[in-house]
Amino acid sequence: MTPRQRLRRLLTGLVLVTAAGMGYALWVNVTHLAVPCLFHVITGLQCPGCGVSRMCLALLRLDLPGAWQANGVLLALLPLIGGLLVYRATVYVRRGNVPTARWETLVWSGMAVVLLLWGIVRNVV
């Protein structure tokens, strides 16, 4: 597969994911019905991702305080997540499927640890 084909494939996926996200945002804004967190429904506790939908909807309204209130830790991690995704997309377009570098795995693992700790702290405090 050529770099141009990989770019086209990547952009097609990005458009589909964006369309699905915007469709979900529209659905929630019109119906006020959102997908519930099963972890929260079952345990009554908030998982590390609880509030992601509210955070994204607040970001669409450019409401940073609302996004922070919904899930501040994930909001703080968004620039790093975005940077890693852009880096990985660039590597994919230029060279194809290349194994993940060790530093990438460490960064993703570190973010997972931060989110797990956040999941504990937000239920204790």
Image (cartoon, rainbow, N blue to C red):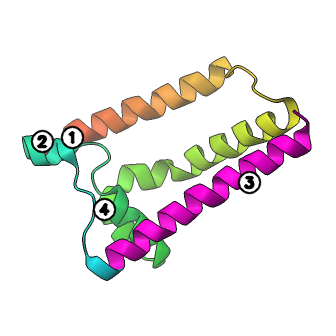
**Which of the labelled discs sits on residue 121, or is there none?**
1
Chain-order first, disc 3 or disc 2: 3
Question: Residue at 82% of width from left, 39% of height from top?
Answer: 93
Do labels 4 and 3 touch, CB within 8 Å?
Answer: no
- SS category of the residue bearing label 4: helix
Q: Which one is closest to the eye, mark 3 or mark 2?
A: 3
**Which of the labelled discs sits on residue 124, or is there none?**
2
Residue type at mark 1 is Val
Q: Where 2 sits versus 106, above or below?
A: below
Do labels 3 and 2 touch, CB within 8 Å?
Answer: no
Q: Position of residue 86 (x, y in %)?
A: 70, 46
Does residue 17 belong to the magenta stretch? yes
Question: Residue at 70% of width from left, 37% of height from top?
Answer: 88
Residue that carries the numbered disc 3 in the rendered image: 11
Chain-order first, disc 4 or disc 1: 4
| Quadrant, the N terminus | top right
Q: Which segment is the magenta one?
A: 1-29
Residue type at mark 3 is Leu
Q: Position of residue 122 (x, y in %)?
A: 20, 46
Q: Position of residue 103 (x, y in %)?
A: 64, 23
Residue that carries the numbered disc 4 in the rendered image: 70
